[in-house]
Image (cartoon, helix red, strand yellow):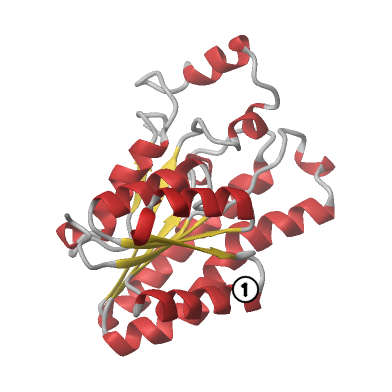
Amino acid sequence: MRLENKIAIVTGGGSGFGEGIAQKFVNEGAKVIVADINEDGGRSVAKDLGNQGHFIRADVSNAEDMKGLIEGAIAHFGGLDIIVNNAGMGHLPQSLETISEEMFDKLVNVNIKSVFLSARYAVPYFKQQKSGTFLNVASTGGVSPRPNLTWYNMTKGAMITATRGMAVELAPFGIRVNALNPVAGETPLLETFMGEDTPEIRAKFLSTIPIGRFSTPRDMGNAACFLCSNEADMITGVAMEVDGGRCI
């Protein structure tokens, strides 16, 4: 019960890593707002969490949605302690000069602007209560970029830098900010990163991960639980790899 009585928001909580984080948090005693643009997935996960879960539809790139998400969490559960900025998007592998401006803007809005918006609306509340935790789900791509995913890698590098900057600025107010860098996982985004899902491509991808497997929602849930718990109350500004050794 490392998160007992904590209230958390997990964006992108309707599938993949977000679902794993939400489930782990509830198992450890937290109440969780599952935020997702996919209503079916979000409602399904929240239902599985029972009375400890609640769904709020939110487009993390939209200011009004994010404002409503923060206010809705506080209104529903009576407070807010943790925000996990997990919602994200990628693109099919392709040469950097061929990515459309529309796709570039979407990547920036979903992967970077979402962190800005969560801070904009949650930091005043966290400052008032003199505590709070942000966890930003970045990527190994922000540390060790792969070819043909350049602009995705850029957005994740920005998340890591934002994490460190937020950590320094917000530490005096009792607010911690950390990040997780997963390698590709068994989530809806996997095929996006690989281009197509074949045994040959999987084998090639897995050969770059020393432990020999993808990150799982369970891996991410365990790491997120630690960084958001009081056990990590001296840890801030860290971008922890959950990657089986890929970035070594």
Q: Position of residue 216 (x, y in %)?
A: 41, 33
Name the residue furthest bottom.
Answer: 128
User: At 72% from the left edge and 35% from the top edge, which residue is drawn?
Assistant: 92
Q: Position of residue 31 (x, y in %)?
A: 33, 63
Residue 178, can we see it?
A: no
Amino acid of disc 1: Asp
Q: For numbered disc 1, what is the local secondary structure? A: helix
User: At 83% from the left edge and 55% from the top edge, which residue is drawn?
Assistant: 101
In this image, 101 relative to 226: left or right?
right
54, 219: nearer the viewer: 54
Q: Position of residue 179 (x, y in %)?
A: 39, 55
Residue 233, can we see it?
A: yes
For the C terminus, the quadrant is top left
Q: Is residue 33 above or below residue 187?
A: below
Sort mark 1 into few (<14), some (14-19) or many (20+) by Cα contacts within 10 Å.
some
Q: Is residue 90 above or below residue 112?
A: above
Instruction: Report how many numbered discs are placed on residues in the image.
Output: 1
212, 68: nearer the viewer: 68
User: At 47% from the left edge and 65% from the top edge, which residue is drawn?
Assistant: 162
In this image, 243 relative to 129: left or right?
right
Residue under circle 1? 65
Q: Is residue 147 above or below residue 35?
A: above
Q: Quadrant of residue 243?
A: top left
